[in-house]
Each structure stands twice: as structure tokens, then as C-alpha cells.
Image: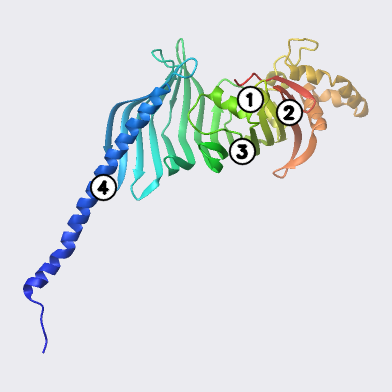
Amino acid sequence: MTHSVPVVWRSRFVFVPLIFAVVLAALWTAFWFYAASAAEAAIAAWREREAKVGRIYTCGSQTVGGFPFRIEVRCADVGAEFRTTQPAIAINAKSLVVVAQLYRSALLIAEVSGPLTVGEPGRPATLMADWSLAQVSVHGMPLAPERASLVIDRLRLERSTPTGTEALANAERTELHARLRAGSILDNPVLDLAARLAGFAVSGVKPLAGRPIDAESTVLLRGLKDLLPKSVPVMLKEFQAAGGRLEITNARAQQGDTIAVAIGELGLSPRARLDGLLRVTVAGLEQFVAAQGGLERLVPGLSAAGSDRRPPSARGLDRLAPVLGGLERLLPGLGGVGRDRTELGILALLGERTELERRQAVAMPLRFSDGAVSLGPIPLGQTPPLF
């Protein structure tokens, strides 16, 4: 004998999945509104904490959206005022959007819309920036981030002048990446840092103007006390006191046919000046100097023999005159190739001949000794204290 399920029970089974879906949707909606409310409360508490230490963040209008799978906080007319710096700094941007996926709580993405202005509070902006895309991503929990990245496309920098604005620099793409290698953001962090510039050009600076530059670098940063917000002078003082070092594992820049790479280590002396040694290798140095119109234009005052007002680099080259005279006697006709070519030849002789990316190159030490800079035996000048 067979038993059949009553029709009334079969109809009830049909509604069970529907009821389950409705309950699940109601629970998810409640969870989303709870998360959105928690996000707003966290932002308000953070702004209050920051205001107590002189960092004021404002938002012309703030909205929270992104239902059902993300929390999206949108702020229009965003501003920041840092009163701990001297003088105080005010930063303003068009809008800021911060997004957190509910199913990927360890990833936070923010996009900033330009233009962005920088200046003193209550005064006209002195620096302006704009771009097609500016995005920040942070991986890790909010109180313990593991890595962060900044990507900017088509960056343009300008400064204000009495007659309007003046272009400073531009770049097709800018990338900055940081990863926590050891420690924590609260206790002796060790950071892996990487940067990349594509199509970078500076206006009004002869060696950097004209053809764009592509550059990239990777460094290891040791000696920070923590990553809590603080002024740059305070951070550098702590870095110097801890014997911090910036280990440059690779730095490469290319402009046209000229390629330069550097490796080494830098720190700060007790007088807050750069201290360390870089090994710089250059291929295509002659093409770079020629593109600048010769060493005389690249280093103003180079031709003014005997003048004490010239840069130390020019006086350093003049000290090599006896060497040049000896080379001319050994190699007749050397003096006829021109001063620039001769000085380039001296630089090549003083450096170490090597190869860089299958091209002939010259490697020389770039030394920083309590701020005094020298390239091989040639003094270049003095760097100012950093704090």
C-alpha cells in the first residue's frame, strides 16, 4: 500500500524556501544598517580624537550607502587642517569616497576627487593638484593594517603666482606601496617601500625638464618608533635617535638614453643632516649632459675659473687641472675635444668602468657625510638639516 503526502503539506513545503529567503534578507538588512551605523560612529569618534591633537577633518556633506554588499561613505567638500605644523596647513579636496566590502572586511578602498589645494588656513592656496584618478587601498584590520598603496593617474601640480598659476610637475602614473615586514604600527615597524613614476617631468628645472623620466625604487625603512600620526620633525627626530636607516635596495631612473641606478644606505647625523653612501651607476652620461647644453649650463659658473663664488662641483673639477694636463701630454689632441668632453672623460676615469643593462657605464660613490655631498672626489655641496 502506498501513502501519499497530503496536498496541504505539499503546499507548505513550497513556501519554506521563500520564508527562509525573506528571513535571511531581513537579517542581512538589519546587519547592513548596524554596520553602517557603526561606521558612522567610528568616523565621528576618530574625528573627535584627531581634533584633540590639532588635526581637524571636515566634511561639507556626508552620506552612507552601498547596500546590500558594501559600506560606502561619501564626503563632499572634504577638508583637513593640521594645526601642529608651523605654519598650520589646510588641505581641501572636492570629494572623498571610502568603500569597505562586507564580505572582505580586511580591504578598504578610498578615492579622492580633485582638485586638491594646500595652503595656510584662511589664506589663498599656494599649491594645487589635480588628476584623473587617485585611489588608496589598505589591507588588514583597521587598527592593524598590513600594507597600503596609493595610485595616481595623470597627476598635475601647480603653484600660485602673483599673476595666476604656474605648472610645477606632472606624471602619467604615480605609485607608492608600503608593506609591514616586522613589528607593528604601534611598536618599531619595519617597512618595505616601493615607488614608481612614469612620464614624470618637472617644469623649470633644466636637468629634469624636457623629456619625461621613468623611475622606480625599492627600499627598506628601519628605525621608526611607530606609525601614529605626528609631525614630520618629530618623526625624523625619533628616527635619528633610534639610528634609523633607509636601505635602498634598488633605485632606477631613465630619461631618454640615459639610465642611472643606485644602491646604498642613508641615515641622519646628530645634526639632522644626511649621512650615508650610495653607489651610483650611469649609462649615457654624455647624452644627458649634451641634452642640457653642456656641463657649463648644467653646472652654472663652471667656466669661471678661479672664482670662489662657483659651486663646489666646479671648483672640484678645476682641482683636477693637473690631471688633465698630464692626460693631454699622454694623449695628444685631448684638449681639442672640448672642455665638456674632457670633464666627462675625467669623471669616467675617476669612476669605475662597468656595464649597465648591456651598455658601457661609470660607477661612482655618492657620499653624504653630515650633510656634505661628494661624487667620488668631487664635492657637490651641503644639504640642509631635515629638522
Disc 2 + disc 3, Cβ < 8 Å? no
Q: Which tag, 1 or 3, sits closer to the chain's start?
A: 1
Q: Secondary structure at mark 3?
A: strand
Can residue 326 be seen in the rendering of this structure? Answer: yes
Question: Mark 3 belongs to which amino acid?
Answer: Val
Q: Nearer the viewer, mark 4 or mark 1?
A: 4
- Disc 2 to disc 4, how far (Cα)? 59 Å
Position of 339 relative to 358 (above/below): above
Q: Is residue 16 above or below residue 354?
A: below
The amino acid beneath tag 4 is Phe
Q: Earlier in the sequence, mark 2 or mark 3?
A: 3
Q: In the picture shown, does residue 215 fall above or below 230?
A: below
| Residue under pointer 4 | 31
Mark 2 to mark 3: distance in Å? 18 Å
Which residue is tagged 1?
A: 207
Label 1 – label 2 distance at C-alpha: 21 Å
Give the residue at the far bottom of this rendering: 1
Residue at numbered disc 3: 219
Instruction: Write down the quadrant of residue 261 in the picture.
Output: top right
Please give the residue where the numbered disc 2 appears in the rendered image: 367
